[in-house]
C-alpha cells in the first residue's frame, strides 16, 4: 500500500469567525445525520479541534476509535491515524477529510526495509511507533506511542528477558529517549519527523536564557531531547521543571496547573498551543520553535471536513488480512497502557 503524499498543496485560507460558525454548524448537523463521531489530533487547526467530539493524542484517539458506537469516524489527523482507527474498528466507515495528509515519519520505513532489518536480527522483538503504515504494523510485535514507549519496552524486557534484542523504529529521537530512560541499548531505526527534528538544542538554549526558571514540556520526538537530558544530568536545568511528554501528557500538565502563572516552554508542533492555552489561560506557553508546523496536519480544514461528511468521501480502508495482523501490536500496546 502506498501512502498518498502531496506536500505542495496551497496553505489553507484563514476562515473568518462567521465562516467558522456557519461551517461548524453544518459539520455538526451532518455528523448527527451520518451518526458520525469526529476525532481530532491536538495538532489540528483550532477551528477543527473546536468542531470535534474528542481531541487528543495518538493513544487517546486510538482508544476512542476502538470504543465508539458511531457508524462513521471522521478522523481529523493524518493518514496513519485514520488507518489505525480502521484497523481497530473494521466495521465502521473511517473518513479522512484529505487523503493526502501523510506523515514524513511514517514514510521513513518501508515494509521491505523492515523485513531486511528483521532478517539481520533473527529473534529480535520489533517495536514500532504508531506513526507507521498498517503494513509496517502488520510486521510488528508491539506498537508504542510517545506516552507509553518506555512502559511498553519495560514490559517486553520483563516478559521476554532483559537481554532480548529490540528493533525500535522509526523515530530515532524517541528510540534514544527510551534507551536513556531505561539505561539499555536497542537497535534504533534512523527515521525522524521533520517537524520535531527541527526543534534543535539551540532553540532550548536561547529560551532558557530568555525565561530562566520556566518549565519545559518536551515531546520525545524532538531533536533537542538528548541535549535537554544532558542539561538535566549535568545539573544545568532543574529536573523538576523538565517534562518529556506526549501531547496528551502536556495537556494533563496544563490541567494540573490551571490556576498558575508564569512561562512554560513547549517543544512540539504549534497546534498544541490551542488546547494548552484553553486549559491554563494564565500560563504563558511559548513554543520552542515557532516554525514547528506540520503541513500534513494543517491540510485538514473545516470545508474539507464538511465535504467528507456530506459526501462520505475520503474513506480509509485497510486490507482485511493486513488489518488482522496489524491489530495484534496495537492491542498489545493498548492493553499495557
Ligand atoms: P502524540 O502521540 O504525542 O499525540 O504525538 C503524535 C505525533 O507526533 C503525531 O504527529
Ligand atoms: Fe508526522 Fe511529524 Fe506531522 Fe506528526 S508532526 S504527523 S510525526 S510529520
Image (cartoon, rainbow, N blue to C red):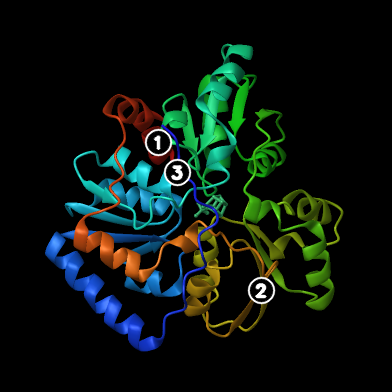
Residue in view at x 80 percent, y 75 percent = 212
Query: Does 254 sit above or below residue 117?
Result: below
Task: Please report the residue visible at 49 percent of the width from the left and 63 percent of the height from the top.
Answer: 298
Task: Tell me the crowding category of disc 1: few under 14, some 14 to 19, or many 20 or more residues within 10 angstroms, Cα based.
Answer: many
Determine crowd level at label 3: few under 14, some 14-19, many 20+ residues with C-alpha closer than 10 A. few
Which circle's residue, 2 or 3, is located before the other in the chain?
A: 3
Considering only order in the chain, which callout, 1 or 3, is on the residue closer to the N terminus?
3
Left or right of residue 14: residue 319:
left
Q: Where is residue 98, by image quadrant?
A: bottom left
Tag in front: 3 or 1: 3
Query: On residue 330, which mark appears?
Result: 1
Q: Are marks 2 and 1 in contact (CB under 8 Å)?
A: no
In terms of depth relative to the viewer, which is nearer, 81 or 18? 18
Query: Alpha carbon of mark 2 to alpha carbon of mark 1: how far?
Result: 33 Å
Q: Where residue 308 sits: x, y (%)?
A: 27, 59
Pointer 2: what residue? Answer: 264
Q: Position of residue 164 (x, y in %)?
A: 61, 19
Tell me the crowding category of disc 2: few under 14, some 14 to 19, or many 20 or more residues within 10 angstroms, Cα based.
many
Amino acid at each position: 500500500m502506498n501512502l498518498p503524499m502531496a506536500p505542495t498543496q496551497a496553505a489553507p485560507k484563514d476562515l473568518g469567525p462567521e465562516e467558522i460558525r456557519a461551517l461548524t454548524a453544518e459539520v455538526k448537523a451532518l455528523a448527527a445525520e451520518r451518526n458520525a463521531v469526529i476525532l481530532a489530533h491536538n495538532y489540528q487547526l483550532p477551528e477543527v479541534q473546536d468542531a470535534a467530539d474528542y481531541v487528543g493524542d495518538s493513544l487517546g484517539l486510538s482508544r476512542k476509535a476502538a470504543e465508539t458506537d458511531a457508524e462513521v469516524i471522521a478522523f481529523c489527523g493524518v493518514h496513519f491515524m485514520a488507518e489505525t482507527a480502521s484497523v481497530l474498528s473494521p466495521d465502521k466507515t473511517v473518513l479522512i477529510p484529505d487523503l493526502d495528509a501523510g506523515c514524513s515519519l511514517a514514510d521513513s520505513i518501508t515494509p521491505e526495509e523492515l523485513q531486511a532489518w528483521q532478517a539481520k536480527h533473527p529473534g529480535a522483538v520489533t517495536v514500532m511507533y504508531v506513526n507507521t503504515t498498517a503494513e509496517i504494523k502488520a510486521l510488528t510485535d508491539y506498537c508504542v506511542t510517545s506516552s507509553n514507549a518506555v512502559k511498553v519496552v519495560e514490559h517486553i524486557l520483563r516478559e521476554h528477558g532483559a537481554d532480548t534484542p529490540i528493533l525500535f523504529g522509526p523515530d530515532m529521537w524517541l528510540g534514544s529517549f527510551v534507551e536513556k530512560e531505561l539505561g539499555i541499548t536497542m537497535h534504533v531505526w534512523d527515521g525522524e519527523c521533520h517537524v520535531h527534528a527541527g526543534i534543535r538544542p539551540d532553540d532550548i538554549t536561547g529560551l532558557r536564557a530568555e525565561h530562566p526558571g520556566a518549565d519545559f514540556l518536551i515531546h520525545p520526538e524532538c531533536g533537542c531531547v538528548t541535549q535537554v537530558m544532558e542539561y538535566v544530568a549535568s545539573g544545568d536545568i532543574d529536573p523538576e521543571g523538565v517534562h518529556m511528554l506526549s501531547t496528551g501528557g502536556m495537556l494533563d500538565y496544563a490541567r494540573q496547573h490551571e490556576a498558575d502563572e508564569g512561562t512554560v516552554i513547549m517543544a512540539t508542533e504549534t497546534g498544541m498551543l490551542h488546547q494548552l492555552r484553553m486549559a491554563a489561560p494564565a500560563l504563558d506557553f511559548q513554543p520552542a520553535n515557532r516554525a514547528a508546523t506540520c503541513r500534513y496536519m494543517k491540510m485538514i480544514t473545516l470545508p474539507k471536513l464538511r465535504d467528507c461528511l456530506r459526501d462520505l468521501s475520503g474513506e480509509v480502508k485497510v486490507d482485511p488480512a493486513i488489518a488482522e495482523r496489524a491489530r495484534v501490536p496495537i492491542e498489545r500496546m493498548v492493553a499495557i497502557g
